[in-house]
Amino acid sequence: MRDANKTKLILGAGGKALTTVALFDQGLTQILQAGVTGLLPKHPYQLVLSANPDGSGTVEPLASFMTNPTGSAVVNTTGPIRQIVQGDVPVARRYLGIREGAPNTPGAIVQVQQP
């Protein structure tokens, strides 16, 4: 979903929608807010941009977070994210995802941007 000031993206795994991401347009940058669910409780994760829709290829961390006792979290970050994930700029499109681990111990991609 997209309107003049907001873009909504869904992340998930195995065809199941688990995380809702809202991008609020502030001009050249966006505020990203993700309502993350479906992860292991009290574990570190990273919201990332990946080169490919399946989470493979070059991965760039956007924000690190720790899930709460129910395996969920609210994650906030800022940057030129909408232009990158929608291919609105002349750089290679990238895809949002969530991977296990902390910055110094990255793990596997566990959720990817759904079409």
Image: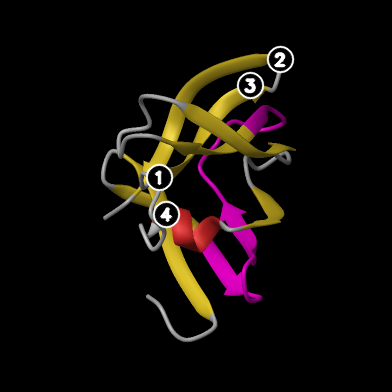
Residue type at mark 1: give it: Tyr
What residue is shown at x 38% (from left), y 34% (from top)?
A: 51
Instruction: Read off the residue under disc 3.
Output: 101
- In space, the residues marked 3 and 1 are separated at their CA atoms by 18 Å
- In space, the residues marked 4 and 3 are separated at their CA atoms by 22 Å
Crowding around mark 4 (Cα neighbors within 10 Å: few <14, some 14 to 19, many 20+) is: some
Residue 13 in the magenta stretch? The answer is no
Number of the label disc, if any, that sits on residue 85: 4
SS for dot 1: strand
SS for dot 4: helix
> Mark 4 and 2 residues: CB-CB less than 8 Å, in contact?
no
Question: Would you say 72 lies left or right of 13 here?
Answer: right
- In space, the residues marked 2 and 3 are separated at their CA atoms by 8 Å
Q: Residue furthest bottom?
A: 4
Of label 4 and label 3, which has the lower sequence position?
4
Crowding around mark 1 (Cα neighbors within 10 Å: few <14, some 14 to 19, many 20+) is: many
- In space, the residues marked 4 and 2 are separated at their CA atoms by 25 Å
Instruction: Read off the residue under disc 2.
Output: 104
What residue is shown at x 60% (from left), y 57% (from top)?
A: 34
State which region is magenta. 21-45
Q: Residue furthest top?
A: 105
- In space, the residues marked 4 and 1 are separated at their CA atoms by 5 Å
Of label 3 and label 1, which has the lower sequence position?
1
Residue 22 in the magenta stretch? The answer is yes
Query: Could you say which quadrant of the image residue 110 lies in?
Result: top left
Instruction: Read off the residue under disc 1.
Output: 95
- Tell me the mark number nearer the camera, choosing from 4 and 3: 4
- Tell me the mark number nearer the camera, choosing from 2 and 3: 2
The N terminus is located in which quarter? bottom left
As rendered, which of 67 and 113 lies closer to the eye?
113
Crowding around mark 2 (Cα neighbors within 10 Å: few <14, some 14 to 19, many 20+) is: few
What residue is shown at x 62% (from left), y 69% (from top)?
A: 28
